[in-house]
Image (cartoon, rainbow, N blue to C red):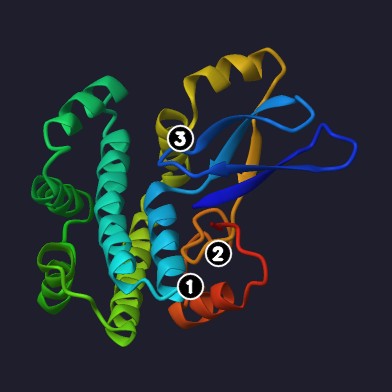
């Protein structure tokens, strides 16, 4: 999948098409030779969910389920790091400890459960067994799901992500912790130096279904049916082949 950036230094805006990656930073050169830093302002779990939504629209149900499932795992990682930032744990210690569980989704889930419990003094909502079984049949047993079942899974995962993001937003000073996360994990360290030298990155705000950078920041305006219909009716996709 590709996405499009635009060079703002050219007299006429020049498009730059690039393959997406799991990071949010890109160093690109436009057709006229202007080299600039670009930042994609969305979270990894948000990008993975969007990939799943595009796959579902195109009829690739199995690929859609996989993307939706992995997006939840990256949501857990995001929440874990926010909780640790709030606790004042340094980035080096955070990263060193997370590396111990980085290859085990079950360990990450366990870490999320107990950090959530510690923060909110209540147990987190687990994903329903029927949805877990559906995911496992698709991802581990090679089952090809129907569009109807995949759409139901997409809606469930969307609402699950939004519910957790809304809960996260109830933390005092959450904007500060999210900004720290953004600085620690979404900005290329070289971009800081370039910014000090008068060459700040160009931010690219993307309209997505989850919308961490747009819409109501408490996520109360997120409705799956509305967001999915908007995506389907959008004439020009920001993700394309």
Residue at position x 49%, y 39% in the image:
24
Relative placement, left or right, of 56 versus 91 is right
Residue at position x 31%, y 37% in the image:
86
Give the structural element (helix, strand or loop) at label 1. Answer: loop
Residue at position x 72%, y 32% in the image:
30
Relative placement, left or right, of 3 versus 74 is right
Query: Furthest residue to the right?
Result: 11
In the picture, the disc for residue 239 is none
Seen from the viewer's position, the closer of residues 177 and 1 is: 1
In the picture, the disc for residue 216 is 2
Mark 3 burial class by Cα count in 10 Å: few <14, some 14-19, many 20+: some
Q: Quadrant of residue 117?
A: bottom left
Q: Quadrant of residue 101?
A: top left
Q: Which x, y percent locates residue 216? A: 55, 64
Residue at position x 31%, y 64% in the image:
63
Relative placement, left or right, of 131 versus 183 is left
Relative placement, left or right, of 180 versus 234 is left
The residue where tag 1 is placed is 222
Q: Nearer the viewer, mark 1 or mark 2?
A: 1
Seen from the viewer's position, the closer of residues 57 and 175 is: 57
Seen from the viewer's position, the closer of residues 24 and 222 is: 24
Give the structural element (helix, strand or loop) at label 2. Answer: loop
> Which label's residue is closer to the chain start, 2 or 3?
3
111 over 236 or under it: above or below: above
Q: Which x, y percent locates residue 122? A: 16, 61
Q: Which x, y percent locates residue 21? A: 44, 41
- Asked if disc 1 and disc 2 are in contact, CB closer than 8 Å, the reply is yes
Distance (Cα) linking label 3 and label 1:
24 Å
Give the structural element (helix, strand or loop) at label 3. Answer: helix
Distance (Cα) linking label 1 and label 2:
8 Å
The residue where tag 3 is placed is 186
Mark 1 burial class by Cα count in 10 Å: few <14, some 14-19, many 20+: some
């Amino acid at each position: 999948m590709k996405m499009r950036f635009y060079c703002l230094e050219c007299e006429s805006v020049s498009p730059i098409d690039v393959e997406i990656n799991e990071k949010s930073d890109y160093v690109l050169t436009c057709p006229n030779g202007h080299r600039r830093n670009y930042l994609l302002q969305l979270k990894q779990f948000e990008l993975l969910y969007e990939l799943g939504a595009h796959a579902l629209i195109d009829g690739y149900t199995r690929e859609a389920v996989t993307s939706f499932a992995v997006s939840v795992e990256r949501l857990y990682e995001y929440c874990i790091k926010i909780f640790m930032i709030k606790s004042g744990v340094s980035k080096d210690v955070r990263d060193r400890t997370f590396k111990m569980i980085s290859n085990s989704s079950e360990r990450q889930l366990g870490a999320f459960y107990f950090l959530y419990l510690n923060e909110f003094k209540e147990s987190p909502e687990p994903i329903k067994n029927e949805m877990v079984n559906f995911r496992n049949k698709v991802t581990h047993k090679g089952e090809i799901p129907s569009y109807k079942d995949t759409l139901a899974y997409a809606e469930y995962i969307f609402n699950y992500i939004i519910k957790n993001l809304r809960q996260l937003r109830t933390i005092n000073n959450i904007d500060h912790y999210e900004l720290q996360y953004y600085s620690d994990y979404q900005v290329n360290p070289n971009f800081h130096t370039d910014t000090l030298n008068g060459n700040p990155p160009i931010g690219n705000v993307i309209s997505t279904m989850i919308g961490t950078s747009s819409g109501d920041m408490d996520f109360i305006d997120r409705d799956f049916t509305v967001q999915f219909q908007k995506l389907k009716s959008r004439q020009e996709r920001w993700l394309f082949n």
